Image (spheres, helix red, strand yellow):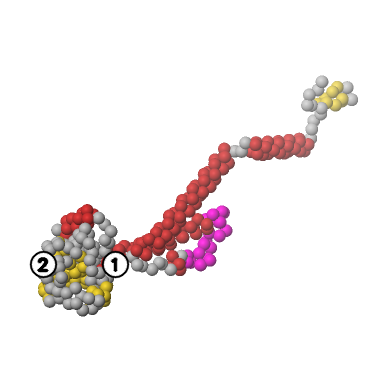
Amino acid sequence: MFRKHKYILDKTDLRFKKEKMPLKAKVVKSLLWFAVSCILTIVYVSIFKTLFGSPKEKHLAQQLEDIKLRYSIVDRQMDNSISVLNDLRLSDDMRYRPILDMDSLPETYRKPGVGGIDHYRHLSGLMNSYLLISHMTKVDMISNMANVQKESFKSVTDRAVVWKEEMEHQPMISPVDVRFRLSDSFRFREVHPVLGTPRMHYGQDFAVPLGTDVYATGNGIVLEAGRNSGLGNYIVIDHGYGLRTTYGHLSRIRVAKGEQVKRGDLIGLSGNTGTSSGPHLHYQVNQFGQHKNPIHFFNNDITAEEYEEMIEVLSSRSK
């Protein structure tokens, strides 16, 4: 049996001889085998890649998944940052500014533009450009919100310093221990207890024993410290911001004109001097030259123990 070779009968000598293939046929045959081999190789490689993929492709695919995960994490972090900034904005508008009597920031200031519709034009046409534009939009939003909130909190902080100073000057405590009862109030009296005539009572009286401690109700400067026929021994404190307080019918004055006092400082002792029907303290509040009801300026619901503790704390701070 002959293998791979073709033999023919030579009639001249009656012998089988190997057939010789022409060179052209050999070349064509070789090229044909090469082409078939290439095709089979390509088919096998394609099938292998489809089923298993190359190590480089696997590595690149893994890198792509990692990048997508990181984008997702960054996107979530930016959303959280925006949520935190919105919470700060609510605190700013609903808590700090109302307390400090400040207007809310206008919406146009809180949400400024970022350069128009062509701001992200340089990102268009890139692979996954929608992701880049989405992230850059959020980055710019966070930057704008943070800058606006920073400036807002700076103005709130500046205002808080002024507000704290103003609050320290407000006459916000009772001038005597709260254990003593309130007597004659801010009202029109048809009969004055001493003069016997109708007259407006512009202050709040406290029924206190002779020699009861009298405290400054807010920081200020002693404007007057002396005596007249009506209030007897009296003190007037200028608290600034258009506010003045008057303490009348004192038995003793412990401060001098021009002296600076702080809330809780002992300024005198109660008495029965001037036009008075008995020992008591007359306390008066004026705001921009207008008489105000003193009861609206202090809290009389605290206990005597709380009042004493407050005076101790205030006294320790003023030393």
Q: Position of residue 294 (x, y in %)?
A: 25, 68
Residue 167 percent location from the top left of the image = 26, 65
On the image, the x and y values in percent for residue 280 come to 17, 66
Q: Determine the image quadrant of residue 131.
A: bottom right
Percent x, y for residue 207? 19, 64
Give the main secondary structure, helix, strand or loop, of the magenta stretch: loop
- Please indicate whether residue 8 sits to the left or right of residue 164 in the image: right
Of residues 83 and 103, the one nearer the viewer is 103
The answer to which of marks 1 and 2 sits earlier in the sequence is 2
Picture quadrant of residue 166: bottom left
Q: Is residue 257 visible?
A: no
Secondary structure of residue under mark 1: helix
Task: Tell me the tag on residue 262.
Answer: none
State how many labels appear: 2
Which residue is nearer to you in this view: 106 or 123?
Answer: 106
Residue range corresponding to the magenta coloring: 112-132
Left or right relative to 127: residue 277: left
Q: Residue at x 12, y 66 (%)?
A: 271
Which residue is depicted at the point 58% across and 41% down?
57
| Farthest-out residue, top | 1
Measuring 21% from the left and 79% from the top, which residue is drawn there?
197
Which residue type carries mark 1?
His
**SS class, disc 2:** strand
Quadrant for the N terminus in the image: top right
Q: What amino acid is labelled 2 in the image?
A: Ser
- Viewed as shown, does residue 50 lie left or right of 183? right
Whether residue 132 is visible to the viewer of this picture, yes or no, is yes
Per the image, the residue denoted by label 2 is: 251
Labelled disc at residue 296? 1
Q: CA distance from mark 1 to mark 2?
A: 26 Å
